[in-house]
Structure formats: structure tokens, C-alpha cells
Amino acid sequence: MAMPDDRLTTLEIRAAEQEKTIEELSGQIAEQWKVIERMERKLAALADRFLELEEQTASDVPVTKPPHW
């Protein structure tokens, strides 16, 4: 049977490993969040650019009802 000190040491090792894993995951989440924010900014810029180009190429012909209406 394991001695109480051995069990305590095992629990401390597990807790330390879990803490390290949590810190690593937290760092990865922070990096992913930066990537997401950067992509959102790029998407917004592209959407604005698309709207500007669409406005520039829009025809000046007014929209009217087809003759069969």
C-alpha cells in the first residue's frame, strides 16, 4: 500500500501538471483571440472596400418597372 507521503506527492505532481496545462491553454486562447480580432478588422476593411467599389460601378440608370407591369 502506498504511503500517505507518496499519495500527497502524486497529487502535488498532478496539480502542477494541470496548472502548467491550464497556463499553456490560456496562452493559446489569447493568441487565437488576437488572430480573430485581426481577421475581423480585415473583414470589415474588405466589406467597406467592396461597398465603395459597388457604389462606384453602380449604374446611373433608374430602376423602373418592366413594361409588362
Image (spheres, helix red, strand yellow):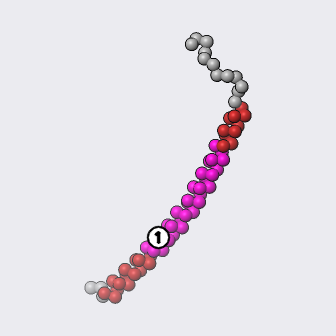
CA neighbours of label 1 inside 10 A, class few (<14), some (14 to 19), many (20+): few
Q: Nearer the viewer, residue 57 or 19?
A: 57
Q: In the displayed structure, does residue 7 sit left or right of residue 65?
A: left
Q: Amino acid at mark 1?
A: Ile
State whether residue 62 is above or below residue 36: above
Place of residue 64 in the rendered image (x, y in percent of width and height, measured from the top left): 63, 19
Let me know if residue 43 is in the magenta part: yes
State whether residue 22 is above or below residue 56: below
Q: Residue furthest top?
A: 68
The stretch in magenta equals 18-47
Q: Nearer the viewer, residue 48 or 31?
A: 48
Place of residue 12 in the rendered image (x, y in percent of width and height, measured from the top left): 40, 81
Place of residue 40 in the rendered image (x, y in percent of width and height, measured from the top left): 60, 51
Reading the image, the residue beneath label 1 is 22
User: Residue at image x 59%, y 60%?
Assistant: 34
User: Residue at image x 34%, y 88%?
Assistant: 5
**Quarter of the image where the N terminus is located:** bottom left
Q: Nearer the viewer, residue 37 or 13?
A: 37
Place of residue 29 in the rendered image (x, y in percent of width and height, measured from the top left): 52, 63
User: Residue at image x 50%, y 71%?
Assistant: 23
State whether residue 31 is above or below residue 9: above
User: Residue at image x 67%, y 22%?
Assistant: 62
Q: Residue furthest left?
A: 1
**Quarter of the image where the C terminus is located:** top right
Secondary structure under tag 1 reads helix
Q: In the displayed structure, does residue 52 sit left or right of residue 65?
A: right
Q: In the displayed structure, does residue 21 sit left or right of residue 10?
A: right
